Image: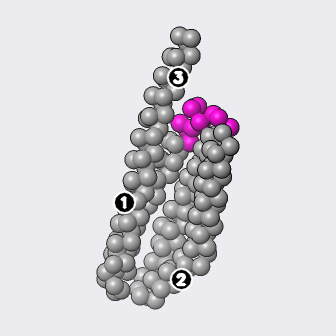
Amino acid sequence: MKQVQVKTLFLKITVIIIGILVLALCIFLVPHIANFTAKLYPHIAPIKYLVFIVMYGAAVPFYFALYQAFNLLRYIDENTAFSELSVKALKNIKYCAITISGLYVLGLPLFHFIARKVDPPVGFLGLIIIFASLVIGVFAAILQRLLQEAIKIKSENDLTV
């Protein structure tokens, strides 16, 4: 049991570090990208705010998903990993990943505008984020389904014993 808590502690620290890194990106990089985009297209006034909406809008479900992952690790520590709370956490992570993907799909024209004036690989950044969040969403959906089946089997076994 102690070995599991060490591994979950490592994962909790990793989740916190990821959260801090994304916060630093949101504080320092996003305003720079928005200002850069505004300089590229000075005749399109709201383009700066569109960058803020897409990137900060995606940060909200990202942090909620990190919180749910942290809760999931806490459930593992408390030996309640096979519970409806874990299923709910995985479902929330799945919805957050889909939301992030959706926001970046809506922001693809924005990335296209930036890529037209800058180096084209910038346009692939949005596609990478969309693909990564979709993979996470599908993975969370599969884990959610497996966990629901495991809980169902566990409850059936508890009734027979």
Secondary element at tag 2: helix
Q: CA distance from mark 1 to mark 2?
A: 24 Å
Q: In screen coordinates, is 116 left or right of 78?
A: left
Q: Give the foreground label among 3 and 2.
A: 3
Of callouts 3 and 2, the N-terminal one: 2
Quadrant in which the C terminus appears: top right
Q: Which residues are magenta?
A: 78-89
Identify the residue under disc 1: 131
Q: Which amino acid lies under the numbered mark 3 shown in the image of this protein?
A: Lys
Say which of 62 and 14 sits in front.
14
Secondary element at tag 1: helix
Residue 99: assigned label: none
Residue at the spot 52% in from the left edge and 22% down from the top edge: 154
Residue 32: assigned label: 2
Quadrant in which the N terminus appears: top right
Q: In screen coordinates, is 160 left or right of 146?
A: right
Residue at the spot 33% in from the left edge and 78% down from the top edge: 121
Residue 154: assigned label: 3
Tags 1 and 2 touching, CB below 8 Å = no
The image shows residue 93 at horizontal and vertical percentages of 51, 48
Q: Give the foreground label among 3 and 1.
A: 3
Say which of 101 and 133 sits in front.
133
Classify mark 2: residues with Cα within 10 Å, few (<14), some (14-19) or many (20+): some
The image shows residue 157 at horizontal and vertical percentages of 52, 17
Residue at the spot 58% in from the left edge and 49% down from the top edge: 69
Tags 3 and 2 touching, CB below 8 Å = no
